[in-house]
Structures are given as structure tokens and as C-alpha cells.
Image (cartoon, rainbow, N blue to C red):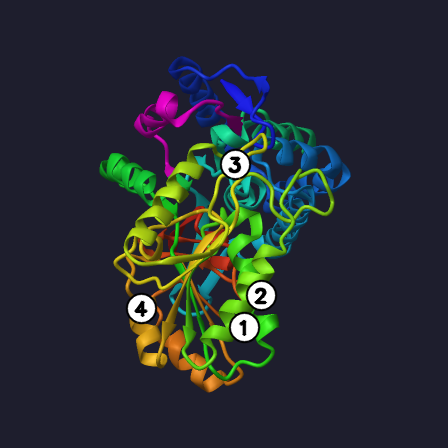
Amino acid sequence: MKIFNPASGEVLTELPEDSTESVLEKYKKLKSAQPSWASRSIAERVACLGRFSDLLEKEKDQLALTLTSEIGKPLKESYNEIKGARDRIRFFLEKSEQYLQDEWIILDGGTREKIVYEPHGVVANISAWNYPYLVGVNVFVPALIGGNAVLYKPSANASLTGLHIQDLLYRAGVPKDIFEIIVGRGSVIGDYLLELPLNGYYFTGSYQTGKHIAEKVASKLVPCQLELGGKDPVYVMDDVERIDDVAASVLEGTVYNNGQSCCAVERIYVHEKIFDEFVESFARQMKELKIGDPLDDKTQIGPLSKIEQRGFLLSQIDDAVKKGATVLSGGKVMSNKGYYFEPAVLVNVNHDMAIMQEESFGPVVGIQKVSNDDEAIRLMLDSPYGLTSAVYSSNFDRAEQVMKKMNTGTVYMNCCDRVSASLPWSGRGHSGIGSTLSYHGIRAFVQPKAYHIRG
């Protein structure tokens, strides 16, 4: 399997792919060793993951360079991702014992009652390429702390980072037969992974793949948690102050990691009273973004991670233009080496256009004018996705009325495109099922057992 550098289009290296035989052998090892891992104390398992976090910090230079080389994100964003992963791990280290320890519900009377949390067993972590550390630690860290063995399938595009993760976990003290990595393309071994008698499936990726996984494993009646995509909207009210600052915040939510984020801003609705001023500021600031070598400290936009995404973005823009949209900035494939694409902003858009309905997963966005809050709410809700939504306003009460009506797992006021370890990360509709992070994300990897005790 060839690993490409998105900044140059050249081959970084080649990796041997797993076969169905090697995947089965890895599963058998995990299944045999998992009870021993589960028998360790929570404190012991937490200590291993603490050492893993320390190694992330110690070796962040090499890890960030590898991440940038195979994904294409600016080097400073790779450092940010590793730091963010350590912040999330810290939450799990500090909170897991609290939420996994036995809970005595009734201590008095003829029958004592308690809840014990037990691991599922061997679980699959089918991860994503856009934030391999962040979406990875959401799953394999609490899964391991909960006493599970993990069969880890990184995206083919993030295989080198996946191998780094495996190496650091082993060096941190996680047994080699408790965490196994599968290297390969989904088309080669993906479906075979779904046939194995695993005790849980945790996937991060597209709606189409998530739906396929859910259908394939439904008959097993095991947990299947899906963290899928989004078509995340932002509404800018007419009472905002400092429009340039608001435009800068929304722009960052649109183009950070080249827009390759499930919670990136993909639709913008602006009140008609400030529409022209906002659009001018947003488009101007987008044109000022520095596009270039992701290893350059001044670069804000690197290449797209996958070459085929350029054609998809062009098709969305072409569809919009044919239906009356205007491209104010960007929207073209750049002539230099690598998978570069100019960030694009479109106006005169509507919901007949794919760019306002289908997930883009790239640095393109449409801005639509609305006359009032009710129209904004109606348009924001006009989507099968339900991951995040945001409102910019100087009036909390007014903004809250919009946030309450959003059918999304996360709502923001005066910010966007952020995740907190202490809050659940969950989607609705085509954005997935289940939660990671917070205490919900700790208990997503264990199952409760009820004890009724007499005598």
C-alpha cells in the first residue's frame, strides 16, 4: 500500500497490508488476552495511558512531522492536534476511576444494590484520517481504560500515524496482545473486520460508510457507535458587534484543517441588515490566507489530504454556479505540485444547490441572506445531518431560542468548530449515534451489571 505526501503528490513509503488471515490471528490474540487486562485495576490501566500521553509530548516533533507529511495539514496544526489529544487524555486519566468504580445504590435494608461496570470485550476502533490523534484517543483511550482489548484500524491515509500510536502504547506498558493495529484499505479488509465476532464497533467517518457498518453488524446485537459527518450551519444575527472579528471566527471554523472536519462550518446564514458588510469582510480575509508548504510556519492552508476531493469540490461549485451562485473568491485547483485547492466562498446560494445540502469536507462555503431568525432556523434545520450548529449574537436570550430549536448534538454561541473533553460529542440523524467524551464517552465502552445482594 503506497503512502503519498499530499504536498508533493510523491510516494512517502510503502507498507505491507494485512490479510484476512493476519486480521483473524490478531483478533484471536486479543480475545485470549483481554480477560487478563480487564482483571487489572483501573489505576493500573490509567497509569499505562498516562505514560502514553507523556510519550506524545516527548516525541511530538517526530509525530507532528509524520502527521503533516501524510495528511498535509500545516505543521503548527499537527502540533495543536497532539496537544489537544493530550488534553483529552488528561480528562480520561482524571475522571475514569470516578465513573467506572462500583456504585452502591442501596446500602441499607434487606437487599443491598450496586452497579458494576464491565468491559465489552474486544472492540473495533475504525478511525479517521482527518484528526487521527483526536478521534483516535476519543475511542481507544477510554476503551483500554475500561478493560477492553482494541482492534485498531486507522485510515489508510493515516497509517504511519497509526503505527506511531501503536508503538507508543506498547512502550507505555499496554500489552501487545491488548492493542493490535490493522494496516490496509477499507476495500481490502474492511468488510472482513465486520464479519469477526467482535463485542463492539466504534467508527469515525462518512455517513455512507457508517450506514454500511451499522447494517452489516446489526444482527450481532453489539454496540455500534458512529461518529459521522455534518453540514454544520452558522447563523450571524444583526446584533453582533465587531463584524470583522465575527467573520474571522467563522472563517477559521470554515478553513481550519482545510475544512476537513466533521464540525467545520459548511453553511453560513447572515441577517440581511449586515449581510453585505459580513460578506465583504469574510471574502477579504479568505483571500488573505497564506496557502503553501505545510512545513512553513507561515502557511495557514496546506493541500487537501486526498486528491479525489478536489474533483468533488469542483463539482459542488459547478453545480452552484449553474443554478445561479456567484463565486467571490477561490474555488480552483492550484497549479503547483500536490493536492492544493483555493478556499472558496459563494453567495447567491440556496438549498437547491449541493453545496448547501451535501457535506463538502473541504474549504468551500456558501453564504445565504436571511430576513429574520425564523427563516434562519428553518434553513438550518433543512438537513439530514445533526452534528453542530452555531449562533453569533450579542444577546444570549435571543441566541438561546435558536439553539434550543437546533436538532444537533452540539450548539455554540459566538464560537464554532470546537470540542471539549468534558462535554459529550454526539450526532443526530446522518451525523451518527452514540457519544464520545465526557462521562458518557467513558461509559460508552463498558456495560453495567446490576447486583442484588441479600444476607
Mark 1 sits on what residue? 414
First in residue order: circle 3 vs circle 1: 3
Q: Could you tell me which residue is drawn at 52 percent across and 64 percent down?
A: 416
First in residue order: circle 2 vs circle 4: 2
- Marks 1 and 2, how far apart at CA: 8 Å
Question: Disc 1 on helix, strand or loop?
Answer: loop
- Marks 2 and 3, how far apart at CA: 23 Å
Specify the label residue 305 is tagged with.
Answer: 3
Identify the magenta region: 178-200
Residue 278 x, y percent position in the rendering: 51, 72
Q: Is residue 185 magenta?
A: yes
Specify the label residue 379 is tagged with.
Answer: 4
Q: Is residue 371 left or right of residue 423?
A: left
Q: Does the rendering let one see residue 419?
A: no
Residue 351 x, y percent position in the rendering: 28, 61
Q: Could you tell me which residue is drawn at 55 percent across and 34 percent down?
A: 335
Callout 1 touching callout 2 (CB < 8 Å): yes
